[in-house]
Amino acid sequence: MNTSFSILFLALILSISFGFKKLAETSKFQIFGEMLTQINTPEKVIALTYDDGPNPIYTRRLLHVLARHQVKATFFVIGNQVEQYPEIVQDIRLQGHELGNHSYSHRQLILTSRAVIRSEISKTDQLLRRNGVHQAIHFRAPFGYKRIRLPLVLSQLKKKNVLWNVDPKDYRASSSKTVVDHVIDRVSPGSIVLLHDGRGDRTLTIEATAQLIPKLQSQGYRFATVSELLSLTSPKS
């Protein structure tokens, strides 16, 4: 009997752990606060978003591509990168793009204390404010992981957790075509597309962006920042 009980208890613990892992990773559900992955709109408008910068090489190259096509995007930046490259943050802002908060150190925030979570968010907010960002600063959870504490803190701070509904996993793609095909196949009105401009070689992402913009424009899509997208209508979650 004791052995059977132990097995059942272990199975229960494993099931709960697995459930919490899925809750942390899912982009479909959040217990507290406001999370969004897509905007409910009939307009063919989408947001290109870039995580993990600023990067002195790839962010600058990406800005050139966006400027050439006259497209605005949203950059979810890491605070310690902002400290290293404030001039690139200024370039992003002055070129009319939106800046969001992707934590200070890009650590997983699902097993940390609420004090650590607050610090990770507030330090990056303060850095962005010092670099001239005056509008609301949206947040994106590192790795998209949430669980309970992070959404609770975000709710208390009245911050939206801006995730995505299109993720081509550009950081491990074998070619720019793979990224482009994934986005083209899955994008829809109100989509938020996840891409990256830091924490690795992002050459494929830049190439993919240069190909994606005209392809999507030929399908009637236009591009907006996350805040512009939010102004259209209510979020899907």
Image (tube, grey):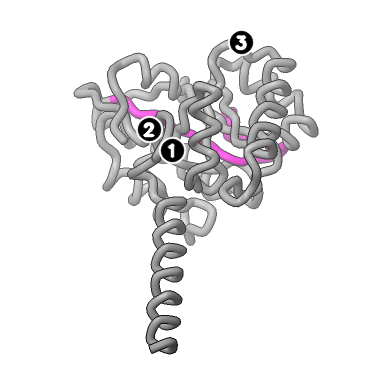
From this viewpoint, which residue is outermost toward the left?
Answer: 42
Residue at the right extreme? 84
- Say which element carries label 3: loop
Q: Residues within 10 Å of mark 3 (few under 14, many from 20)?
A: few
Point out the image quarter for the N terminus. Answer: bottom left
Kindly report the distance in space between the C-alpha atoms of the residues bearing marks 2 and 1. Answer: 6 Å
Mark nearer the N terminus (2 vs 1): 2
- SS state under label 1: loop
**Residue 28 placement (x, y as % from top left):** 33, 44
Q: Amino acid at mark 3?
A: His
Q: Nearer the viewer, residue 68 or 51?
A: 51
Q: Quadrant of the C terminus?
A: top left
Check contact, mark 2 vs mark 1: CB within 8 A: yes
Q: Position of residue 18 (x, y in %)?
A: 42, 64
Q: Which residues are magenta?
A: 45-64
Quadrant of res 212: top left
Q: On the image, numbered disc 1 is attached to which residue?
A: 163
At 59% from the left and 17% from the top, the residue drawn is 95
Disc 2 to disc 3, how far (Cα)? Answer: 22 Å
Instruction: Write down the residue under mark 2.
Output: 36
Task: Give the amino acid at mark 1.
Answer: Leu
Q: Is residue 46 part of the magenta span, yes or no? A: yes
Q: Nearer the viewer, residue 194 or 184?
A: 194
Q: Could you say where residue 119 lies in the image, as x and y percent from the top left?
A: 70, 33
- Name the side, left or right, on which 74 lies relative to 217: right
* Residue underneath mark 3: 134
Q: Residue at x 56, y 48 (%)?
A: 110
Q: Element at badge 2?
A: strand
The residue depicted at 76 percent of the width and 25 percent of the height is 86
- The amino acid marked with disc number 2 is Leu
Q: Residues within 10 Å of mark 2 (few under 14, many from 20)?
A: many
